[in-house]
Image (tube, grey):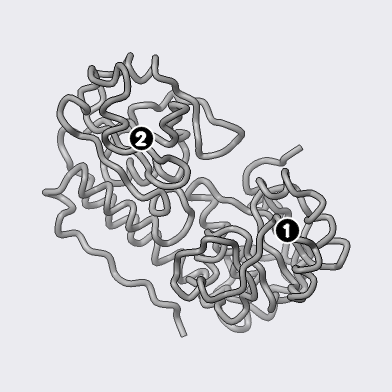
Amino acid sequence: MRVSRMSLRATLVLLMSTVWIWGVPASPAAVETAYPATATDDFGRQITIKGPFQRIISLYGAHTENLFAIGCAEQIVGVSPNEAFPPDATRKPVFSYHDDLEKFLAAKPDLVLIRPMIDRGYGRLIGGLEKAGITVVSLQPTTPDELRQYWRLLGLLSGKLREAEALTTHFFDQVERFRKAAADIPNRKRVYFEAIHDRMKTFSPNSMPIFLLETVGGINAAPDAEVVRESQIAYYGKERILAKADQIDVFLAQSGVMNAASVDTIRNEPGFHVIAAVKAGQIHLVDEMLVSRPGPRLLIGMLTIGRILYPERFGTFSLPTWEVPH
């Protein structure tokens, strides 16, 4: 049975200090005294961290993107298929959870980063890695609080605590800029945010996409959606969407592998012609990598949504470039 979301936030223990790593200044000395440490990952796995891992295989694109963001390029010895960002990730050896155990062992990783879906579906591979003495860590943050803990754990796993702390500060400083910019917006728009069109699913009220939407001043039109398996996705259904037809000012949909719907698909969905946003031509697509994938590019997703909803407020809003501290 899966444990509660990101249980590491409650169970990460520093064995050499009584201070939580989150409260330790991200200095070289703090990095040295952070080990050994223990944590519990998203699948309930107990992890012993004796020191920074040096040969990391990432089987989830979000892990890859975030590792690069905190300066771990040299430690990454393998990535998942179809990596696209950052471009340097495309030049790394490719590994899949469909591959034989022997391929992984030949790369001699000391850490394999996965997400719970892989734990649930590919237990034989995961068991083989662990039997070979390779540390496996399963993580998938879905809320802002979990994102903070996720970055800090990646920093601990990789020895990049200072960089992870800097990324966290950078990200949430920008979130505050968005909040201040949206603080006095009048007549806020009500938005239905579609996650999967053919199943009529939206995002859970505490998910990252809804966090982005609300930060820039949007109102979630489906706050009563029921979460699917403690994920970002939530059930809703056409009947409930149409029951709120006159309350939806903007119809927003993530676009990508998870949701291949086009503007025309949404516009021509039987019954959707009564939705206020559809009548007004307010159907917009947003790249799922910018709204659903946990990482620093969520800021770009936030800006994209802000410009869709309130172009007069966010049209000239700009974001500083993130650079790994040296």
Q: Is residue 84 left or right of residue 153?
A: left
Res 190 quadrant in image: top left
Q: Position of residue 15 (x, y in %)?
A: 77, 67
The residue depicted at 46 percent of the width and 25 percent of the height is: 225
* Amino acid at dot 2: Phe
Q: Amino acid at mark 1?
A: Ala
Q: Compared to 257, does 243 lie above or below?
A: above
Q: Quadrant of residue 94?
A: bottom right
* Nearest the eye: 194 or 103: 103
State whether residue 246 appears in this view: no
Q: Position of residue 270 (x, y in %)?
A: 32, 18
* 174 left or right, relative to 161: left
Mark 1 closeness class: few <14, some 14–19, many ≥20 residues within 10 Å? many
Residue at coordinates 51% horizontally, 25% vertically from top-left?
A: 226
- Residue 87, relative to residue 189: is it above or below? below
- At horizontal 50% and vertical 71% (from top left) the residue drawn is 90
| Label 2 close to label 1 by CB (< 8 Å) | no
Q: Indicate the quadrant where residue 236 lies.
A: top left
Q: Earlier in the sequence, mark 2 or mark 1?
A: 1
Dot 2: few (<14), some (14–19), or many (≥20) neighbours within 10 Å? many
Residue lying farthest to the right in this orientation: 131
- Residue bearing mark 1: 39
Residue for point 54% across, 30% down: 227
**Residue at mark 2:** 193
Q: Secondary structure at mark 2?
A: strand
Q: Secondary structure at mark 1?
A: strand
User: Which corner quadrant holds the N terminus?
Assistant: top right
